[in-house]
């Protein structure tokens, strides 16, 4: 299942709408295959979680700016997967590469924090590939 939409209040009251057209919704049947490949950022979230909704636009920007795939997993629907990765609070965002967690960010953070985090935790070969993907052809 791809895409989702959510609305949350902005910092000064008006609703912000986040459409996660490029973010893949994972479930028990798709999770292991999704994390088995190249770098994938996975957001462990729940629909009732305000901070989870607040980072939706950040995750979508991260996908387009950093060039890594972004997916999310509803922990209410799949608590066994949250438990497998010791997700005790949400939002929890993990980077997976070759099926293994490479790093984690807990809580809502600004885009710049996620970009610095990815630069620190992505394997060097993956970081180079992501940088090349993001550059226009010369």
Image (tube, grey):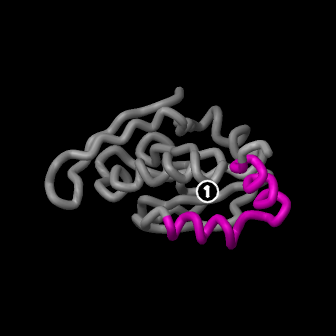
Residue found 20% across the figure and 45% down from its top = 15
Q: Is residue 89 magenta?
A: no
> Outermost residue, front direction?
138
Q: Main secondary structure of the magenta part?
A: helix
Q: Position of residue 113 (x, y in %)?
A: 51, 70
Secondary element under disc 1, as helix, strand or loop, is: helix
Q: Is residue 3 above or below residue 132?
A: above
Residue found 53% across the figure and 59% down from its top = 93
Instruction: Identify which residue, 58 or 5, lies in the foreground.
Output: 58
Instruction: Identify which residue, 22 or 53, lies in the foreground.
Output: 22
Instruction: Identify which residue, 116 or 136, lies in the foreground.
Output: 136
Q: Which image quarter holds the C terminus?
A: top right
Residue found 55% across the figure and 57% down from its top = 83
Q: Position of residue 67 (x, y in %)?
A: 66, 49
Residue found 65% across the figure and 67% down from its top = 103
> Outermost residue, left direction?
13
Q: Is residue 80 above or below residue 29?
A: below
Q: Is residue 87 left or right of residue 47?
A: right
- Looking at the rendering, the stretch of residues picked out in magenta corresponds to 112-135
Q: Is residue 63 above or below residue 95?
A: above
Q: Position of residue 47 (x, y in %)?
A: 34, 44
Q: Is residue 18 left or right of residue 3?
A: left
Q: Residues within 10 Å of mark 1 (few under 14, many from 20)?
A: few
Residue pointed to by mark 1: 84
Q: Position of residue 96 (x, y in %)?
A: 69, 55
Q: Is residue 132 magenta?
A: yes
């Amino acid at each position: 299942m791809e895409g989702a939409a959510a609305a949350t209040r902005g910092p000064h009251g008006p609703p912000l709408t986040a459409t996660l057209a490029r973010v893949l919704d994972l479930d028990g049947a798709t999770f292991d295959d999704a994390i088995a490949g190249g770098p994938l950022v996975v957001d462990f979230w729940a629909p009732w979680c305000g901070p989870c909704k607040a980072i939706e636009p950040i995750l979508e920007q991260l996908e387009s700016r950093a060039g890594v795939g972004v997916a999310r997993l509803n922990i209410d629907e799949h608590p066994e997967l949250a438990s497998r990765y010791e997700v005790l609070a949400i939002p929890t965002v993990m980077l997976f590469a070759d099926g293994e967690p490479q790093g984690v960010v807990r809580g809502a953070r600004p885009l710049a924090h996620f970009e610095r985090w990815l630069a620190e935790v992505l394997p060097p070969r993956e970081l180079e590939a992501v940088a090349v993907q993001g550059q226009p052809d010369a």
